[in-house]
Image (cartoon, rainbow, N blue to C red):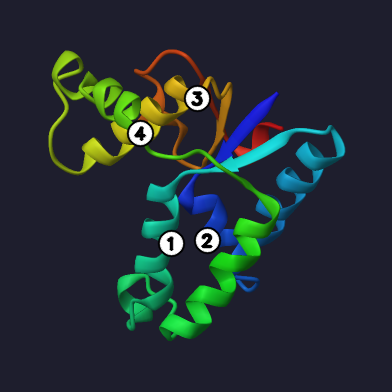
Amino acid sequence: MATALDANILLRLAHKEHPLHLLSRKAVLKMQAEDETLCYLPQNIVECWNVLTRPSASRGGFGLTPAQADRQIRILERFLLLLPDNSKVHSEWRLVVQHDVSGVQVYDVRIAACLRVHGIARLLTFNTKDFARYSGFVAVDPEKL
């Protein structure tokens, strides 16, 4: 089975002092032990870069330089399979109309579209409720593994 890791998981893995770091790490190690294929989406890396390089901790940023963020991202890229964007993902993203999606939720539809196009069965995320309305995959909280 293949599982994609949401940006909130990737960021918890990168931030060792975060209260959810250990839970995220245990979930990923459990899936690796079960020979899961762990994946990431280009969008998730963009979201991570945003948070990693955002200067203010009060605004949720890590305050890393671009060079430091690049080191963190390269570590993730070494261990995860990239699910590339393509025209099929864009066509599937048009679910925004079917599900009447607006505002910031458009990013979740993009993730759902990519998972459906690539046939990925699960998304590991702390925001499972954000993905409940989409079919074709299951959003799983690390605490439920």
Calculate the distance from the C-alpha at mark 4 to the C-alpha at mark 1: 21 Å
Residue that badge 3 annotates: 118
Q: For the residues carrying marks 4 and 2, which lies nearer the camera in this image?
A: 4
Q: Secondary structure at mark 4?
A: loop
Distance (Cα) linking label 3 and label 2? 23 Å
The N terminus sits in image quarter: top right
**Residue position marked by numbered label 4 in the rendering:** 86
Which residue does the numbered mark 1 point to in the structure image? 48
Q: Amino acid at mark 2?
A: Leu
Q: CA distance from mark 4 to mark 2?
A: 25 Å
Q: Quadrant of residue 5?
A: top right
Could you say which disc has been placed on residue 11 in the image?
A: 2
Q: Can residue 64 be seen by looking at this rendering?
A: no
Q: Earlier in the sequence, mark 4 or mark 1?
A: 1
> Do the numbered discs 1 and 3 sit on residues whose CB atoms are within 8 Å?
no
Question: Judging from the image, what secondary structure is the residue with disc 1 in?
Answer: helix
> Label 1 to label 3, Cα distance in Å?
21 Å
Mark in front: 2 vs 1: 1
> Which amino acid lies under the numbered mark 1 shown in the image of this protein?
Cys
Is 103 left, or right, of 138 in this rendering? left
Q: Mark 1 or mark 2, which is nearer the start of the sequence?
A: 2
- In the image, what residue occupies the spot 80% across and 41% down? 32
